[in-house]
Image (cartoon, rainbow, N blue to C red):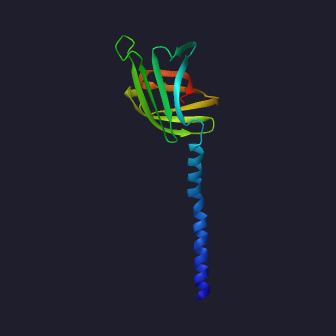
Amino acid sequence: MRFNVWVFILVGSFLNACTAPAGNKQELETSVTKSSPLIGTWKLVSGTTIKGKDTVVTDYTIGQEMIKIISPTHFSFLRHDLNKGKDSLASYAAGGGRVRIGDSTYTEYLDYFNIREWEGGEFVLAYTIAGDTLTTTGVEKVEALGVDHINIEKLVRVK
């Protein structure tokens, strides 16, 4: 009888040990994501859109400001003009959603945006970080609006 109790305890311990790594793997993935250099607050400096042979470069330091906040699970962005909406250049944009972060790419799942046709978009962005500068490159495609271009953004870390 004593032998059966010990066998039961050993088998139970073995089965418990076999299932433990799945939980540990999830914790490991979370800790790796939390330590990603992508995590933080970034200020948009410039943006380049390329559609066919046309390239448009925008300097986001003149008359407007935008920040992007990236956490291990979500992202958000806020952009507004610096004249408090009181002239013909008045603008405001805000959005965000879930994010999946990898070593050299991350995916934004745009769940919320004040231009509603963009909601539900999934945007895969390649990224590099050099010092305090983040550069992202990806394709933005929104069929409902006829948007289909390459978007390159340069951001600096907010300290």
Viewer-side residue, 9 vs 86: 86
User: Of residues 95 and 107, which is closer to you in this image?
Assistant: 95
Q: Is residue 112 above or below residue 93?
A: below
Residue 141 horizontal side relative to residue 135, left or right? left
Q: Position of residue 98 (x, y in %)?
A: 47, 39
- At x 58% / y 83%, what residue is drawn? 5
Give the quadrant of the C terminus: top right
Task: Provide residue 30's location: percent of width, then percent of height.
Answer: 56, 48
Relative placement, left or right, of 13 versus 86 is: right
Please tell me which residue is depicted at 39% across the width and 27% down the height of the picture: 117
Q: In the rendered view, would you say 99 is above or below 156?
A: below
Looking at this view, name the residue that lies furthest to the front.
Answer: 159
Please say if 10 is above or below 141: below
Side (left or right) of 19 relative to 115:
right
Q: Residue furthest bottom?
A: 1
Q: Quadrant of residue 23?
A: bottom right
Q: How many marks?
A: 0
Residue 80: percent from left, percent from top = 41, 21
Quarter of the picture holding the N terminus: bottom right
Where does residue 112 sit, x and y in percent of width and height?
40, 33
86 in relation to 153, above or below: above
- Which residue extends farthest top? 88
Q: Closer to the camera, 151 or 64?
A: 64
Q: Quadrant of residue 9?
A: bottom right
